[in-house]
Image: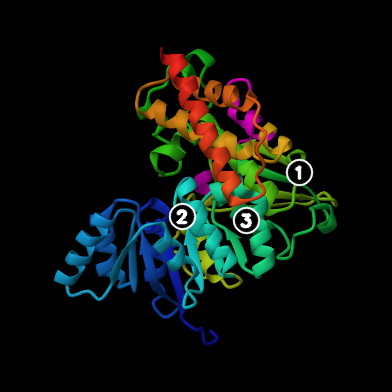
Amino acid sequence: MSHVSVQSVTVLGATGSIGKSTLDVIARHPERYRVYALTAHTSKEALLDQCKAHSPRFAVLDDVADAQWLQQALRQAGSNTVALAGEDALCEVAQAPEVDTVMAAIVGAAGLLPSLAAAEAGKRVLLANKEALVMSGALFMDAVARSGATLLPIDSEHNAIYQCLPSEHRGGLAKHGVRQLLLTASGGPFRGWSAADIANVTPEQACAHPNWSMGRKISVDSATLMNKGLELIEACWLFDATPEQIQVVVHPQSVIHSMAAYNDGSVIAQLGNPDMRTPIAYGLAWPERIDAGVETLDLFQVARLDFEAPDETRFPCLRLAREAMQAGGAAPAVLNAANEVAVEAFLAGNIAFGAIPDVVAKVMALPYSGQADSLERVLAADRWAREQAAHTIRQLTA
């Protein structure tokens, strides 16, 4: 192996499932990676344990009191890690000159600013935060182009497509002989259920995903297929594709992570065990390959692969997302914000599972004249949609 310089890595969202998997891969290669900063929203005890294990220079929490608690606990443990608090600190550790690579794995709109800061600073950005592209796709891709950042998608589907395309693939799919991108979906836990049964799903049922282990919000999105809708929007931005060039394919085994169909009739697929450490290791080491701690797929054990078309009547969120991307402007940000509020209301037991797409559709049908040409305007659309969604939910539950 050629001599490799040690890469300095910031992990935004270190205590979530992607963050933990990233640290697992990093710990396997101490000769390649060192941790510069770890951040968490409120999980201070988990962050303390990670700081003890990985000795970052900085640890960032949302709240000042939490950061003070962490700083004291770190001192008592004999650690030199400095604890910081707030959004400015998040952006600082994402764009610090010493940092080579940023894992952007903060869930939700909170991940927007630090992800954008990393892109603007020309970092290698491992993007696991959907909102950066869903809410502000044009701004984000512009920042990457301007700064010369390297953008590597970590979502298993987008990472798979990235692996199936030539390494230089901007400028539209046709330019590279690609006819269509095939985005695979497990179909979620309710794939075979009737519309009546889907309407009455409980939060516990929605959070029990058959193939992947994930947080509660993304588990619900996976069950409504909104997750796949958001991924369709992301894929349009990442690969310069139109919504019409992306076909969602329900594939219950989650073994093929996505495919690219070429003009000559070739379809290239990326397969693997459903383990996020594979795309994470790919992003960290690209263009090289490193051990991720993942077993090679046993095809004899898999035995068969099934495919079917998604049912957009029972799962309207996929259609809503496609319509938002076609509408352009602030529509994807509005879709995303309304969905976040609806999912929260469902998890809190305030609305039924079947009401999630209804809330999103109602908010999307309202006239909104704002643009999405600056971060302030994107965040304004986000706030507006959240208010409208909350109002819609109050009407539903009155």
How many other residues sit within 10 Å of disc 2, few (<14), some (14-19) or many (≥20)?
many
Asked if residue 372 lies left or right of residue 108, the reply is right
Res. 242 mark: 1
How many other residues sit within 10 Å of disc 3, few (<14), some (14-19) or many (≥20)?
many
Image quarter of the C terminus: top left
Provide residue 333's location: percent of width, then percent of height: 59, 40
Provide residue 51's location: percent of width, then percent of height: 28, 67
Q: Alpha-carbon distance for marks 3 and 2?
A: 15 Å
Q: Residue at x 64, y 31 (%)?
A: 368
Asked if residue 10 lies left or right of residue 288, the reply is left
Amino acid type, label 1: Thr
Q: Alpha-carbon distance for marks 1 and 3?
A: 17 Å
Residue to which mark 3 is pinned: 140
- N-terminal label among 1 and 2: 2
Asked if residue 378 lies left or right of residue 92, the reply is right
Asked if the residues shown at circle 1 and circle 2 are in contact, with their CB atoms under 8 angstroms apart, the answer is no
> Foreground: 128 or 179?
128
Q: Secondary structure at mark 2?
A: loop
Decide whether residue 259 is among the magenta residues: no
